[in-house]
Image (cartoon, grey):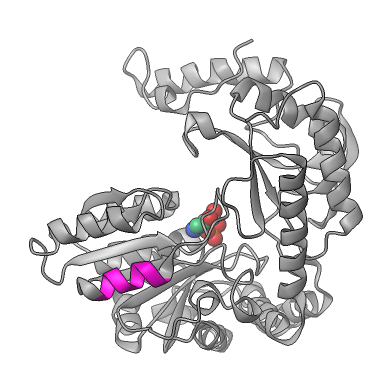
Amino acid sequence: MVYKIDIQSNRKSQDGTILGKISDFHEQLIVHEREKVNILKKSPLTSVSDTEVTYYDRFEKKEKTALMFASNNYLGAITNQICIDTAIEATKKYGIGSGGVPLLSGTNILQNQLEQAIAQTKGFDDAIVFSSGFAANLGALAGLLSPDNLIIHDKLNHASLMDGTIMCGAKMLRYKHNDLADLEKLLRENSPLYPGGILVVTDGVFSMDGDIANLPGIIELVNKYNVLLLIDDAHATGVIGEKGRGSLSYYGIAQRDNIILTGTLSKAVGIVGGFITAKQEVIDYLRIFSRSNMYSTALPPSVLASAKAVFEFMQTTDIVERLNQNASYLRTRLKQEGYNTLDSQTAIIPIVVKDQYLLTQISKMLLDRGIMANYIFPPVVPPNLTRIRISVMATHTNEDMEYLISSLNEINATHPIKKS
Ligand SMILES: Cc1ncc(COP(=O)(O)O)c(C=O)c1O
C-alpha cells in the first residue's frame, strides 16, 4: 500500500505544470481514501469540542463517540458557560462583526479592553490583536525586519515564523533546537556584521515536542550581544507560568526591554485570534507597519469579549494548576509504561512512533478504540521522529487518561510502539 503523502515532492509536478502537481497529489489521496486512512481529511465533529466528542465517520457513514486527546482547548474554555454567555451578550450588544480594519472604523471598545488585558497578563505596556496567531507572527516579522537584517531561529520554530521570515526578506540562520552553544556561535560570528539588526526568535513552548525554550540562557545571550528577542507564546499562554501567564512568568523573568512576545487566542483561550505584546513604542510602530493588522478586518465583538473572559477565568480559578496536574500525571504514566515522550514538559505530549506505516495503522486502531489523537508526519517533524501527539486538557479525568494508556498498551502488544 502507498500510505505516504509525499508533501515535498507534491510541491513540484512531474510535468512541470501547476495542474500537474495537483493531479499527482490527488492520485496519492485516492489511495489513502481506498485504504480508509483518515489523515488528511479528518472526520468532522458533530458535537462541541470537549473531552468527549461525537464525530461523523466518513467511512462507516455514521456518528461515533471518542475521547478527545487532540485539542488545543487545554483549559476547556470552549465550553465555559461564563465565557459563552459573555460572547452572546457582546453579540447582542454590538452585532456579529466589526465592520472595518482596526485603523479605520473597526476598533470596538472591547478590542482596547482585550489588548489591555493581554498586555497586563504578560507584563508589557500594550498589545495588538490580530485575526490569528499566524497573522500576528507574519505581522511582527514583516513589520519589524527588512532584507538588511538577520533573523536567527530555533530549528523547531513554528511555520508561521518561517513564513514571516520569507515575507520580511531578512537573511535567516537556524540554531540547533534549544542549543545555547550553537546560538552563541551564530551570534558571535554575525553580530559584528549586523550592528543593531539581529532578531532571535523562539517558540516559548514548542508545538510538536511540548518542551520549553531555555529563556534564561537565551536572554543572557541576547543581552550579551545586544540583539532583540521574539518569543511565540502560542502554546505557553494559559499553560505555563503563574496562572498561565506564559514562558517569561514560568522562569520568573522580569526583563521586558528588547523582547517582543506573540501568541494566539486559539489554543488555551479556545477561540480564534492572535496578538503581539511589547513596549509601547514597539506596539505604536507595529500598529502601522504590521500589514496583517492594518489591512485586515478587526475581530468580531463576541471573540474580543469572550477572550477577555477567558483571561479572567485563568486568573481567578485553579484551572491552569489542574491542567498541569493532568499533564504531569499522563506524562509520568506514559514514561513508566516505557513510551518515548521526548523532552515534553507541558500539555503537549508526543509519543514517538518512528515507522510511518505503523503510525498510520496505530492512528486507525486508536480511533477504533474511541480515542482521537493527532498524528504528525514529515515535513512537520523529521522522518525518524513521526509521532502520536497527545494534547491534555484540564478537564480530562484520571479515568480518561488511564483508558488512553490501556488502549496504547493493547495496541503495543501487536504493533510495537514502545521500541521507538
Ligand atoms: C507555535 C505556534 N505559533 C503560531 C500558531 C498559529 O496560531 P493560530 O492557529 O492562532 O493561527 C500556532 C498554531 O498552530 C503555533 O503552534
Vertical arrangement, residue 2 with respect to residue 293, above or below? above
What percent of the width, then of the height, locates residue 308?
Answer: 64, 82
Q: Position of residue 395 (x, y in %)?
A: 82, 64
* In magenta segment, residue 218: yes
The C terminus, quarter of image: top right
**Which image quarter holds the N terminus?**
top right
| Residue 161, x across and y down, in percent | 38, 55
Q: How many marks?
A: 0
Q: Predominant secondary structure in magenta?
A: helix
Q: Is residue 160 left or right of residue 91?
A: left
Residue at the far left: name it. Answer: 193
**From this viewpoint, is residue 55 visible?**
no
Query: Quick check: 400 above or below 381?
Result: below
Residue at the top extreme, as displayed? 1
Query: Is residue 225 in the magenta section?
Result: no
Q: Which residues are magenta?
A: 216-223
Q: Residue at x 41, y 55 (%)?
A: 178
Instruction: Estimate the x, y position of residue 342 in percent, counting from the top left.
Output: 58, 46
Name the image quarter holding residue 255.
bottom left
Residue 260 in view here: yes
Pick whichever, 359 or 330, lies toward us: 330
Question: Residue sitting at 55 percent across and 75 percent down?
Answer: 250
Q: Taking 184 as reference, is 367 left or right? A: right
At x 78% / y 28%, what residue is drawn?
412
Q: Quadrant of residue 188?
A: bottom left
Q: Residue at x 74, y 21 (%)?
A: 36
